[in-house]
Image (cartoon, helix red, strand yellow):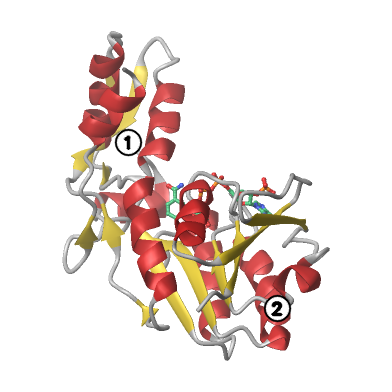
Amino acid sequence: MTSLVLVTGGTGTLGRLVVPALRDAGHAVRVLSRRARDSGDGVDHVTGDLLTGAGVEPAVDGAEVIVHLAGGPKGDDEATRNLVRAASRAGVRHLVYISVIGADRVPLGYFRAKLGAEQAVAASGLPWTTLRAAQFHDLVLKVVRQMARLPVVPVPGGLRFQPVDARDVADRLVGLTLGEPSGLVPDLAGPRVYGLGDLVRGYLAAAGRRRPTLPVRMPGKAGRVYRAGGNLSLEGADLGGRTWEEFLAERLR
Ligand SMILES: NC(=O)c1ccc[n+]([C@@H]2O[C@H](COP(=O)([O-])OP(=O)(O)OC[C@H]3O[C@@H](n4cnc5c(N)ncnc54)[C@H](OP(=O)(O)O)[C@@H]3O)[C@@H](O)[C@H]2O)c1
């Protein structure tokens, strides 16, 4: 049966992978974005802003399922509360949310906002599914590229990551969207654990660049939580198949 799926964040890194897959699975797809875009190819674009609430009611109108992928460095809790309010009134039958591994542990604003957003989803009264994913390869590449612009790259010691490919996250989310509401499902991390220094050096080698690295210490409570692996999911997580090395080889080809 064809149902209308609203994808918030359908224009982002993850959303651009999820939207065509849902359309190809036979759904009518509506994408909410802050900027006007042309509709076509079985995807309808509507304009709205989850932080101000503008355009959110018409965006959710008629949607049976919402896949909520919109996010930014700040305000995901507030944006999600605005979405949930409108979705509850519209009688949505499944709300799917993407969060981040460590949302309940890492004492940084982004993670706190993701936890607030998770709580808004769970308290919405709507049937829901939330997936916590690790950092996407695309984000890690952006960060290490930025770091490698310095003549000497400072690398906070003891920080580890399990980067995951956005394509693996998209596949998982599409499966969850097509299935029944499942609450908080097992985390999705990448197939390997890397020190931040390994990620930087892997990038430098793949890019054919040389830079010395300098060990530094990440201060404060956040540093302690990271060093203790609070951003990792080492037990019970599902693992994506694509590695950081494969991603780098494709991207830097
Ligand atoms: N990147 C990661 O490593 C990672 C890891 C775990 C979880 N996540 C979560 O996965 C989701 C997608 O991440 P991504 O990397 O694909 O993000 P992204 O590429 O930065 O895209 C962000 C998306 O959110 C939309 N958006 C931002 N603010 C909005 C607002 N106020 N109203 C409506 N739409 C808004 C943007 O749409 P327009 O610009 O078109 O308006 C865009 O489509 C986010 O919730 C993020 O927290 C990401």
Q: Position of residue 40 (x, y in %)?
A: 67, 49
Q: Which residue is mark 2?
A: 62
Amino acid found under the numbered disc labelled 1: Arg
Q: Tell me the crowding category of disc 2: few under 14, some 14 to 19, or many 20 or more residues within 10 angstroms, Cα based.
A: some
Say left or right for 82 vs 9.
right
Query: Quick one: 42 or 222, which is closer to the camera?
Result: 42
* Quarter of the rendering containing residue 172: bottom left
In the image, what residue occupies the spot 47% across and 55% down? Answer: 18
Considering only vertical position in the picture, is 119 above or below 21? below
- The count of marks equals 2
Q: Which residue is mark 1?
A: 217
Task: Work out which quarter of the rendered image holds the C terminus and state it.
Answer: top left
* Quarter of the rendering containing residue 163: top left
Q: Nearer the viewer, mark 1 or mark 2?
A: 2
Considering only vertical position in the picture, is 181 above or below 12? below
User: In the current view of this chain or complex, which residue is farthest to the bottom?
Assistant: 125
Amino acid found under the numbered disc labelled 2: Gly
Query: Quick one: 79 or 94, which is closer to the camera?
Result: 94
Query: Residue 153: which disc?
Result: none
Q: Tell me the crowding category of disc 1: few under 14, some 14 to 19, or many 20 or more residues within 10 angstroms, Cα based.
A: some
In the image, what residue occupies the spot 27% across and 55% down? Answer: 189
In the image, what residue occupies the spot 60% across and 79% down? Answer: 64
